[in-house]
Image (cartoon, rainbow, N blue to C red):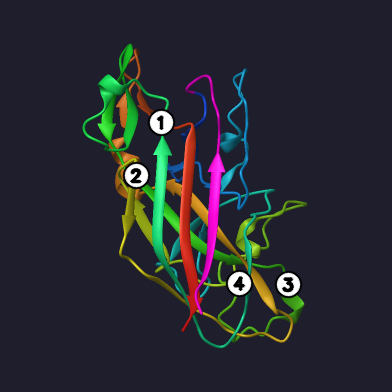
């Protein structure tokens, strides 16, 4: 039997300050904001310059079993999601649909392509850009209860002092759990398959949806400020709604 769940976020903004932008750099490589969609409607009325997406530091983490598998997680943040029972089978995510509203003048759009804003001297140019949506399973389990041979909590890191990282609750690799979004509203025939592993100390996990910039778009957002210094642009929006079905195979 198929179980249908809706994961959505609504953000009402009176300005362009709700945006995904450059968060930090690592070895001179840019790292952009990522954020998790709440499973419930969240409304934020912005009358100031706060951009809550940009509040958390984002870190780049390698899979401890596969160094080519790299993921990005916020520090000091607990992802929200839908409880999913863990069985020794495969979780199927399908019928993925989305609707995005960007706080950009209608005259700037090229059809319904998602737009990013790139700095160029004293103005911003509009470019077609792409978001990356990642489906993740999260749950907390002390490392002492893990067998090192288990392929679980693969992005674990112990280098934080009194800091909590989502990498230490992400159970499985996200290498094959991503879709790309480059327009304001659409659906995809892509099916996400996540092999599940039942664990003695895990009966369920949270199915979470993370949003960020695709690797290709990071460099497309590179521009120059009025002093001809390299600078990065951003992707603004005021609403992001995503829905999907999930089932077991």
Residue at the disc numbered 1? 102
Residue at the disc numbered 3? 141
Disc 2 versus disc 3: nearer the observer = 2
Question: What residue is rendered at 36% in x and 69% in y?
Answer: 191
Q: Secondary structure at mark 1?
A: loop
Earlier in the chain: of badge 4 and badge 2, it is 4
Q: CA distance from mark 2 to mark 1?
A: 11 Å
Residue 86 is situated, as x and y percent measured from the top left of the image, at 62, 80
Residue 185 is situated, as x and y percent measured from the top left of the image, at 34, 44
Residue 53 is situated, as x and y percent measured from the top left of the image, at 57, 37
Query: Would you say the residues marked 2 and 3 are in contact, meaning their CB atoms lie under 8 Å apart?
Result: no
Q: CA distance from mark 1 to mark 3?
A: 38 Å
Disc 1 versus disc 3: nearer the observer = 1
Residue furthest left in the image:
110
Query: Would you say the residues marked 1 and 4 are in contact, meaning their CB atoms lie under 8 Å apart?
Result: no
Residue 230 is drawn in which quadrant? top left
- Mark 4, Cα crowd under 10 Å, few <14 / some 14-19 / many 20+, is many
Residue at the disc numbered 4? 153
Q: CA distance from mark 4 to mark 3?
A: 9 Å
From this viewpoint, is residue 74 visible?
Answer: yes
Q: Secondary structure at mark 2?
A: strand
Left or right of residue 43, residue 1 in this image? left
Residue at the disc numbered 2? 185
- 214 to 191, vertically: above or below: above
Magenta-drawn stretch contains 15: yes
Earlier in the chain: of badge 1 and badge 3, it is 1
Q: CA distance from mark 2 to mark 3?
A: 37 Å
Q: Secondary structure at mark 3?
A: loop
């Amino acid at each position: 039997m198929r179980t249908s769940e809706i994961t959505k976020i609504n953000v009402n903004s009176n300005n362009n300050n709700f945006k995904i932008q450059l968060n930090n750099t690592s070895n001179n490589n840019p790292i952009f904001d990522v954020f998790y969609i709440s499973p419930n409607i969240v409304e934020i009325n912005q009358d100031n310059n706060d951009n809550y997406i940009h509040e958390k530091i984002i870190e780049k983490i390698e899979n401890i079993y596969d160094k080519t598998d790299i993921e990005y997680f916020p520090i000091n943040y607990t992802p929200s999601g839908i409880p999913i029972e863990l069985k020794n089978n495969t979780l199927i995510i399908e019928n993925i649909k989305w609707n995005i509203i960007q706080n950009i003048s209608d005259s700037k759009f090229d059809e319904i392509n998602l737009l990013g804003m790139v700095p160029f001297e004293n103005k911003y140019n509009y470019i077609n850009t792409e978001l990356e949506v990642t489906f993740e399973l999260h749950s907390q389990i002390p490392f002492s209860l893990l067998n090192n041979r288990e392929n679980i909590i693969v992005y674990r890191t112990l280098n934080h002092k009194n800091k909590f990282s989502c990498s230490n609750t992400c159970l499985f690799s996200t290498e094959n759990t991503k879709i790309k979004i480059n327009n304001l509203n659409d659906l995809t025939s892509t099916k996400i398959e996540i092999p599940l592993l039942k664990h003695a100390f895990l009966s369920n996990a949270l199915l979470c949806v993370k949003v960020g910039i695709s690797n290709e778009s990071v460099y497309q957002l590179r521009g120059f400020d009025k002093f001809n210094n390299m600078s990065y642009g951003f992707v603004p929006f005021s609403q992001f709604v995503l829905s999907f079905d999930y089932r077991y195979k």
